[in-house]
Amino acid sequence: MTITEQRISATVLVIGTGGAGLRAAIELAEAGVDVLAVGKRPKEDAHTALAAGGINAALGTMDPEDSWQQHAADTLKESYLLADPRTVEIVTQGAARGIGDLERYGMAFAREKDGRISQRFFGAHTFRRTAFAGDYTGLEIQRTLIRRAGQLNIPVLDGVYITRLLVHDGAVFGAYGFDLTQGTRYLIHADAVILAAGGHTRIWRRTSSRRDENTGDSFRLAVEAGARLRDPELVQFHPSGIIEPENAAGTLVSEAARGEGGILRNALGERFMNRYDPARMELSTRDRVALASYTEIKEGRGTAKGGVWLDVSHLPRQTIMTRLPRVYQTLLDLQMLDITRDPIEIAPTAHYSMGGVWVRPEDHSTDVRGLYSIGEASSGLHGANRLGGNSLIELLVFGRITGQAAAAYSRSLTAQPRSASAVAQARAEIDELLVADGPENVRALQRAIRNTMTEHAGVVRDEEGLRAGLAELAAIEKRMEDVGVHPDIAGFQDLAHAFDLKSAALAARATLEAALERRETRGCHNRSDYPHLDPAQQVNLVWSPTTGITRESIPGIPDEISSLMAEVSTDGKLAE
């Protein structure tokens, strides 16, 4: 069959059409810069649309004493001091403007009777600063950004899989990929590239990411281009993923369910959070609640299916229908379960990559000139535990900043050298896979990686398990040399899965090696053989396949923020 190749160019190419990518594209288009956005999923169905709980900004609409400094203090404290203070400062200072941008684009926030944007508590926030739209906040943000992108006539290519960034002499000059339906190749030239293609949580078996998303694409694209990863081992396991049905295992029950007064019980009927955080109980931080549930299950107090119970049935039906509509609908659709009457069976689920591509805090530029990384693909804001509601605001703040930075970089170029050999390499990589006819099945190998990561790098880790995981991964990497790839009349998904597999293997290796190196327990990273926090490990671990792991020190926290870092009170928060 003849494969055609389309050659297109843009001043800035944005890879990923979730909230981060679209916000960056909007910034560029509003500034009159020629931008192209490319996504492997339909833009209406980007991962951002799944974000439920809310978006943070110290607006002070409910608690006037809130401030960006307090938001920064809460973020740094919950990061277990691994977040970059400059990144935190930029996001918390820019948060109100991010919300203002959404309002300007027509976003429908929940509001109080007098018209103020309503804000609710989330675990570990000092004040009410989480704005929301029911429990469909991410979906509403995604729709708002798609609408704005449409008004600006931003070209968006759905269903195009980027396989390689094109680099010459340390500078990016575009990307290569193919159409998932027709197999048409795309050679895209660009002055700058913004990578917004998500994280790597799909490499675990139980995950809040769906099939074919968050497979580590950003990590592989960046690393193969010459960038590095920071803290890939710091993965947030959300406390509440459903267990059934198997094809939807890990689908989230929003944290809002606990925020509204949901109660956790083990199989014996005990409300177990008083063993782990008697002050905050169910409103404790994500890492503590996930570890508590994991411990209950591991010690034999879990349900027969390996979970615990989350119960909201004692709440008024009206509260559930207005504050948790998505949770209600999801459980009805997937399990025919009425949460106004019955508890939900849940277990911890791989939810968010807090580490990611190494970037500079000011503009999220990487080690590769002209390449930027934002959203879950990047690192710096969350450290060892992400505050609920911070990921959505990060997309807006750095989408705007990086759009401006990419435009400025493009303006600064006197010429844009290209490389015929880099393009040839990208073409050859696809050609070789298309003729690969080995006995190994790509999907089976993906499942093998997910089993390895679940078994050896889950909520709790130890040296023996991580070393076993690396040995298993090495065997899987060997088997990857013998894959068979067979596109068919339905499209080129099999080829895409082969690239997903390459990404998953790289992300798994980075995660296992960094987890082995971080010999301490800090936030989401639990080492049973090193149960305590080690002050000497208050560093970021930076990984690349050529240099392995290097340690990077973290800048000091400004006094105006550090003076506000106190234990967060829980008084009255269950009443919210």
Image (cartoon, rainbow, N blue to C red):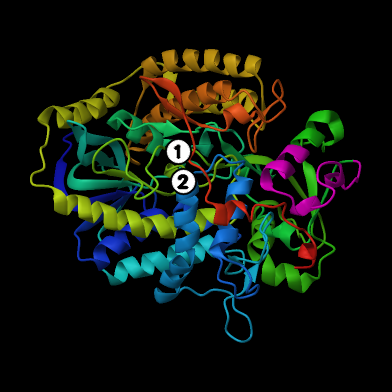
Can residue 10 be seen here?
no
Residue nearer the viewer, 42 or 238: 238
Q: Give coordinates of residue 427: x percent, y percent.
A: 19, 30
Residue position marked by numbered label 2 in the rendering: 376
195 left or right, relative to 7: right
Q: Which residues are magenta?
A: 268-293
84 left or right, relative to 360: right
| Residue depicted at x 40% and y 47% | 361
**Nearer-N-terminus badge (1/2):** 1
Residue position marked by numbered label 1 in the rendering: 356
Amino acid carrying mark 2 in the image: Glu
- Tell me which corner region of the image, top left, top right, bottom left or bottom right, holds residue 142: bottom left
The quadrant the N terminus occupies is top left
Q: Is residue 374 above or below residue 431?
A: below
Q: Give coordinates of residue 131: x percent, y percent.
A: 58, 68
Residue nearer the viewer, 279 or 452: 279
Amino acid carrying mark 1 in the image: Gly
Callout 2: SS: helix
